[in-house]
Amino acid sequence: MKIALIIENSQAAKNAIVHEALTSVAEPLGHQVFNYGMYTPEDAASLTYVMNGLLSGILLNSGAADFVVTGCGTGMGSMLAANSMPGVFCGLVIDPTDAFLFSQINDGNAISMPYSKGFGWAAELNLQDCYRKIFENEGGAGYPKERAHFMAANRSKLKDMKAASCRDMLTVLKSVDQELLKARSPGRSLPSCSIRTARIRRSPTTCGRSDGDLVLACRQAALVTGANTGIGQAIAVALAEAGADVALAGRSEPTETLALIAATGRKAINIKADLSSIEPVQRVVDEALAGLGRIDVLVNNAGIIRRDDLLQFSEEDWDAVMDTNLKTLFFLSQAAARHMAERGSGKIINIASLLTFQGGIRVPSYAAAKSGVGGVTKAMANELAPKGVQVNAIAPGYIATNNTAALQADETRNRQILERIPTGRWGRPEDIAGAAVFLAAEASDYVTGQVLAVDGGWLAR
Ligand code: NAP
């Protein structure tokens, strides 16, 4: 995490003490500290607490910083100024208990501290303890823990309220006193930071990624089918971590997924639907629109598999797989695409399979349906590209989920599969999440009609 330190002019003389306390705690934890001053009372440019707030807004909204440590004499002014910025959630931290509770309950992205009031003997120890409470644990776990869900829900509502009451950062920059804007840095280390108000950077995910750099257009809304478990769950949570509100559509209650998304601070809604027929598709789209206001991303993930010898494969097993895996995927995409085309943008991501490319063994209807998914992905991509909608598919390799439980349990097949995967292990649902976030993001706007294999190298063999 990139931590920006910003200190008001009246406390500039304490910059070295605060910087030393912050780096001594944050750097061993793997964070980077950037000192934006003021550095000394003699600096040519002078930062007032109002400028502290403006600089906090610029650094956080541009992605130049993930967290701001600011402060002034009482801590109040810098906190108020920071909280006047879009996307900035700044807590007043005086002691380690404040720091801990702010981190666990409010999980904001800035703190303001008093560097004059109460800043006496051993003040640097208090600073270190505060920083430790903020940075040593993942924020947002709740306190007491059993109230974590309420706290996550309130954080989400507060974000929505702030988004509704604040202007975007570009408008703020155009509207504020331009002299104030020019003077907001004491000058030594402000990096060139482009303001991209439509984008947000996220911190490392709980799904195992550690890059933190995937970007999604801020306030995106995604609809994911079959997200109570497996690959769908990993994708839904990753999209939420990347900034999207998510509608989950499926036949089982997605209790765990709802909780995981709530913990990210994003909104999640559940739409109960049996997708073995196309009967509910229009209702699913209507409920997602009613709950989220729009659908920017549709992930067609729900799918089943039926295994039997070819010579006795039943019509029932053929129809069940074709209906859920292909027919519903197409008609749900059609219903969502009507909305996306009207808005001139959208992303459809279909979950295909290695059997989009290969025949497999004892799974003819699955191979047919997933090959069909490759076909309709390209067909939809061609017609929807001029309407601003990209359609792509992900072909997961062998991923350890319910879908492959029988294969994992079969000693011989398990060994054969592992021997053929160059990466030497089964995939995990989280392995698919990065590709989904990419295909949902602006970063993939020029990618359409593709089937992206995420298979540990299986197809390369
Ligand atoms: P999974 O754990 O079995 O998940 C399948 C999901 O689809 C579940 O949420 C399931 O809900 C939902 N679903 C199935 N039928 C449904 C229906 N009629 N209505 C609503 N939801 C339904 O398996 P997974 O591996 O994560 O599979 C997700 C997708 O990845 C599938 O399309 C699968 O074909 C594809 N895939 C998986 C692998 C792999 O190796 N695992 C490889 C390639 C492709 P319930 O829990 O209610 O059944």
Image (cartoon, helix red, strand yellow):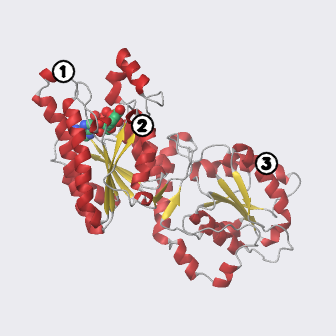
Which comes sooner in the sequence, label 1 or label 3?
Answer: 3
Q: Position of residue 454 (x, y in %)?
A: 41, 40
Q: Residue at x 53, y 75 (%)?
A: 170
x and y percent of residue 238 in the render?
45, 47
> What type is the residue that disc 3 sits on?
Ser
Q: Which residue is mark 3?
A: 24
Q: Which residue is mark 1?
A: 309
Quick one: label 2 or label 3, which is nearer the N terminus?
A: 3
Q: Which residue is mark 2?
A: 429
Q: For this view, does 220 lie left or right of residue 330?
A: right
* Image quadrant occupied by the C terminus: top left
Q: Nearer the viewer, mark 2 or mark 3?
A: 2
Residue 321 vs residue 260, the one in the foreground: 321
Ligand 1 sits in quadrant: top left
Q: Nearer the viewer, mark 1 or mark 3?
A: 1
Residue found 13% across the figure and 21% down from its top? 311
Q: Which amino acid lies under the numbered mark 1 shown in the image of this protein?
A: Asp
